[in-house]
Image: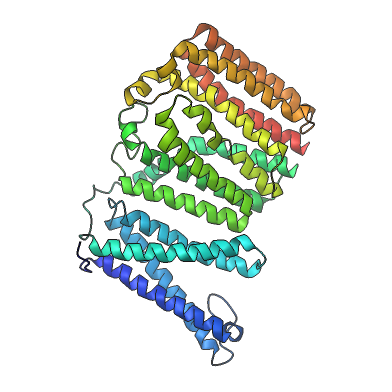
Amino acid sequence: MKFTLRSSFARYVVTLFVSVIALTVAGRIVTLSDAAQFCAGWPLCIPSAPVGWLKLAHLSLVGIASILMALVFRKAWREQRSHRLILPLTTILGVMFFGQALVGAVLISQPEARHLFVLHTLTTVALWISLLLLVYASGVSHGAESVPPVTGKLQRVKDLFALTKPLIVGLLLITTYGGLVIGMKAVPSFSLTFWTLLGGALAAGGSGALNQYIDRELDRRMQRTAKRPMADGRLTDAEGLSFGLGMSLISYYILACFVNDLAAFLSLMGIVYYVILYSMWLKKATVQNIVIGGGAGAIPPMVGYAAATGHLDWTAWILFAIIFMWTPPHFWALAIVRMKDYEHAGVPMMPVVRGEMETRKQIFVYTIELVIVTLLLPLLNLAGTFYLVSSLVLGGALLYAAWAVWRNGGNKLAWRMYKWSSSYLVFIFLAIMIDAVL
């Protein structure tokens, strides 16, 4: 392919590339000359000596490069909506560009944070690689891509929001906050709560978008998912991929900068677990997809606990185990109701492979195991009387619903089990939080 700068997008990218080179050189000169000492302030400073003008010039270049980055980002999302290399690259580049600035700013106030120093260095390397790839990709691309008509702004916002699977995100945030509260054994500060939940929401939403990108062809074959934004063609594949990658990357920067390195690492592992291990491999490979894949949804309370304490102990692992054991009976109940959908799509869910009767039995067995796991907290003296009573009452109700599914069967009871198990998870974590603050 011939490299050319005929498209306006390519020219914007090359201009950005030149500005980043100038910014890097200027930054190095400022460091070697100690110019920062003679021009204090941000985003602008007043030089107290001639060498201080070097720092002011560097800050000016930062502003110019930031404006160019924003323009390239905006242009990509307008003109390259169907390009599955350029749009993701631009999105990742934009997040890393401003993420690096954020990490650098936090490092000034927290110079002892070694994980941020490592993140800053890795971001620098990844940013240059992404920028070089974008220069090349935009140069060999034949101008603007042919894209479907843009829907109204409100509909577009709704579609992007739908990519995040907001109901699932809400459920995961409740478990994250539960881990935060039990870790603090008190109501956590607004600041810690805000940054932990924001990072968690972005991580869960980004994972949901990436899952929909991976499953877009499968979604088109299932009645339940055929109207999802990518399956229905309202958003392009490149938009879904870029949106998911961007949100996931932003979540890591937020958790690393404003919470702690362990919470950020666990959140990243949750994304990798859900997107790669479950969505790309397990979901279509084995009837145990939900059992093994349940670990992804069990990580958020560990993120909350790590945010509160900076470490993991038995309490965090029991919270993980509760959701791990909750996931199979919850989703197998849905799989019974949507069995024909999964069969048509070729997804080896339990009812499709082993039949409804075996699935009903497994729902009951896993529910028994779930209730036993919930009792570990009070048995190990990690929770009090309020939680003990609550877990017994809630567990008894869930066991009754699972027993009804096993003994009687039918979509109506399976759907009731699916809905009640969602409420059960909310209530059990509310009980954990109330018990912790009491």
Residue 186, above or below 427: below
Q: Position of residue 51 (x, y in %)?
A: 54, 90
Asked if one can make out residue 259 in the rendered structure from this viewpoint, the answer is: yes
Quadrant, the N terminus: bottom left
Which of the 4 quarters of the picture holds residue 159? top left
Lateral position of residue 391 relative to residue 289, left or right? right
Q: Residue furthest bottom?
A: 50
- Residue under the point 46% across and 65% down: 125
Q: Position of residue 106 (x, y in %)?
A: 60, 65
Residue 51, above or below 391: below
Quadrant, the C terminus: top right
Q: Position of residue 187 (x, y in %)?
A: 72, 44
Q: According to the image, what is the colour scheme of the structure?
A: rainbow
Q: Position of residue 91 (x, y in %)?
A: 39, 57
Lateral position of residue 379 relative to residue 71, left or right? right
- Residue under the point 54% across and 56% down: 253
Residue 144, above or below 172: below
Asked if one can make out residue 426 in the rendered structure from this viewpoint, the answer is: no
Residue 292, above or below 241: above
- Residue under the point 32% across and 54% down: 85
- Residue under the point 58% across and 50% down: 265
Identify which residue, 168 or 267, lies in the foreground: 267
Query: How many numbered discs, if any?
Result: 0
Lateral position of residue 287 relative to residue 18, left or right? right
